[in-house]
Amino acid sequence: MRKTWIVAMAGALALGSTFMVTIATAEMTERSVTTEKTTTYSGTVSEIDPSSSTITIRSETAPAPTKYVFTKETVFADPQGHVVSYDAIRNTPVTVYYTREGDRMIVSKVVTTKPVVTEHRESTTTERHEIQ
């Protein structure tokens, strides 16, 4: 009888341990899942500060400008997907793709809504000399 009771207790402990490992694994799996929500915002770039890695956007519908943080991974592109420098989009309408990290808004992509125009000027000078 004592042997049967010891075997039953050992079986119960083994089953209980398996159940606890299963629950612990399920809890660890649930805790490791994170969801990032990417949000968009449209407006005109009013300021870009490379020293603080910030970009300020003004919108016609918002009363105050909104400040975002950009990183080395942030992509600045025109509507066709061509990469442009962040200097080229100053005072240009854009759509900003960002995620929120605490109180900071981290930009993953900035897309201009109009093609970025780069100006190229070329001049030619002609000189005439008369030999006498």
Image (cartoon, rainbow, N blue to C red):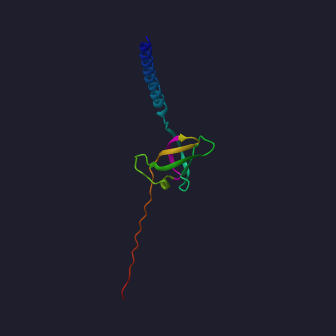
Residue 69 horizontal/vertical position (percent): 54, 48
Residue 103: quarter of image: top right
Q: Give the answer, above or below, for where 128 lies relative to 37.
A: below
Which residue sits at x=45%, y=22%?
19
Residue 93: in magenta span = yes
Q: Give the answer, above or below, for where 45 lies relative to 40.
A: below
Camera-nearest residue between 56 and 132: 56
Q: Which residues are magenta?
A: 90-99
Residue 17: in magenta span = no
- Which quarter of the rendering shows the C terminus? bottom left
Farthest bottom residue? 132
Farthest left residue? 131
Q: Is residue 120 left or right of residue 50?
A: left
- Which quarter of the rendering shows the N terminus? top left
Which residue sits at x=43%, y=61%?
120
Main SS, magenta residues = strand
Camera-nearest residue between 55 and 13: 13
Q: Is residue 51 left or right of residue 1?
A: right
Residue 71 horizontal/vertical position (percent): 49, 50
Camera-nearest residue between 12 and 83: 12
Which residue sits at x=43%, y=48%?
78
Residue 122 horizontal/vertical position (percent): 41, 66
Camera-nearest residue between 53 and 26: 26
Farthest top residue? 1
Farthest front residue? 2
Residue 119 horizontal/vertical position (percent): 45, 59
Q: Give the answer, above or below, for where 3 lies relative to 21.
A: above
